[in-house]
């Protein structure tokens, strides 16, 4: 929300009996985080009984803090050490890099096979994307997913971290094997966008697993058995892959509201 919400919207936000749609409520909460003026307006709109309850809770918290133990010395803060994402995602990214490295070596040892780097490129980022937004592996899932900043933007940031590792590896693998760079990177981005888009309906983890299994059975396995690169990965299909990526990215943007619900991200 780039402008201040109206007094009527703030009054409805403060009234527990009123109802606001999810998009408006999320926008108001994000705006209140950085606007002291609107927070002051909100205080004036809170019912008297609610204000009394909040004052009583604040007083109780102050007494408990004053009577509690002395706070432990603060540890030196490290942005890398305090991010679960960096360390917990590392094994999955390492596995992806190792698989792509083996594909490069196998392609060099068996040149009669179709380009394994090209075949694996679409599904290379999917394990990391599935893990990056999985409630089963994030110990702070409820805390993160319940904040106003959660949603599609956070999912895209975590996906970008995965692509920052996978895309350079794919580019290097394509250079080493002589595979088409466009037909390596564009399907990778298309399947990433597809996982996010389908994630709005079935969850990102389920969407990534389903896309990976379907591609492996429908494309990778037949290509290896027939020793022929499928038509969908021929260099002439680069434009189609680019258009598909843009279409899926646009659809994901249209379904952004679905990513604010907890059930959309597991």
Image (cartoon, rainbow, N blue to C red):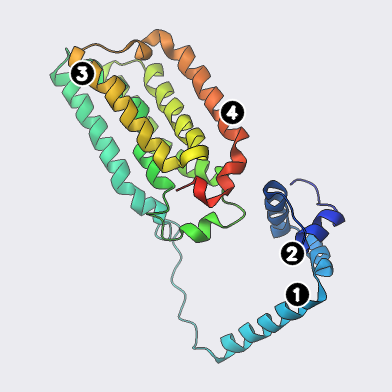
Name the residue nearer the viewer: 213 or 165: 213
* Residue 99 figure quarter: top left
Secondary structure state at the residue bearing disc 2:
loop
Tell me the residue that label 3 is attached to. Answer: 224
Picture disc at residue 250: 4
x%, y% of residue 190? 45, 25
Q: Is residue 67 left or right of residue 212?
A: right
- Distance from Cα at disc 4 to Cα at disc 1: 42 Å
Look at discs 1 and 2 and give the one toward the viewer.
2
- Distance from Cα at disc 4 to Cα at disc 2: 35 Å
Q: In this rendering, is residue 91 above or below 142?
A: above
Marks 1 & 2, CB-CB < 8 Å contact: yes
Label 4 crowd (10 A; few <14 / some 14-19 / many >=20):
some
- Distance from Cα at disc 2 to Cα at disc 3: 60 Å
Picture disc at residue 24: none
Secondary structure state at the residue bearing disc 4:
helix
Label 1 crowd (10 A; few <14 / some 14-19 / many >=20):
few
Picture disc at residue 16: 2
x%, y% of residue 108? 17, 20
Tell me the residue that label 1 is attached to. Answer: 50
Secondary structure state at the residue bearing disc 3:
helix
Marks 1 & 3, CB-CB < 8 Å contact: no
Name the residue nearer the viewer: 240 or 199: 199
């Amino acid at each position: 929300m780039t402008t201040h919400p109206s007094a009527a919207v703030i009054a409805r936000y403060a009234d527990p009996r009123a109802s606001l749609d999810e998009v408006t409520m999320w926008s108001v909460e994000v705006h209140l985080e950085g606007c002291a003026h609107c927070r002051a307006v909100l205080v004036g709109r809170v019912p008297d009984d609610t204000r009394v309850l909040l004052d009583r809770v604040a007083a109780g918290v102050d007494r408990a803090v004053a009577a509690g133990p002395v706070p432990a010395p603060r540890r030196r803060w490290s942005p890398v050490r305090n991010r679960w994402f960096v360390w917990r995602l590392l094994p999955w990214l390492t596995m992806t890099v190792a698989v792509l490295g083996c594909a490069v070596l196998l392609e060099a040892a068996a040149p009669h096979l179709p380009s394994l780097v090209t075949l694996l490129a679409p599904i290379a980022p999917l394990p990391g994307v599935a893990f990056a937004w999985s409630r089963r592996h994030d110990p702070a899932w409820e805390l993160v997913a319940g904040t106003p900043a959660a949603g599609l933007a956070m999912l895209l940031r975590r996906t970008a971290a995965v692509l920052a590792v996978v895309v350079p590896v794919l580019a290097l693998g394509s250079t080493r094997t002589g595979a088409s760079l466009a037909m390596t990177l564009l399907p990778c981005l298309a399947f990433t966008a597809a996982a996010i888009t389908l994630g709005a309906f079935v969850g990102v983890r389920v969407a990534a697993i389903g896309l990976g299994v379907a591609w492996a059975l429908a494309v990778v396995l037949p290509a290896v058995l027939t020793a022929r690169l499928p038509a969908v990965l021929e260099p002439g299909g680069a434009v189609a892959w680019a258009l598909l990526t843009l279409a899926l990215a646009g659809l994901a943007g249209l379904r952004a509201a679905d990513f604010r619900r907890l059930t959309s991200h597991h």
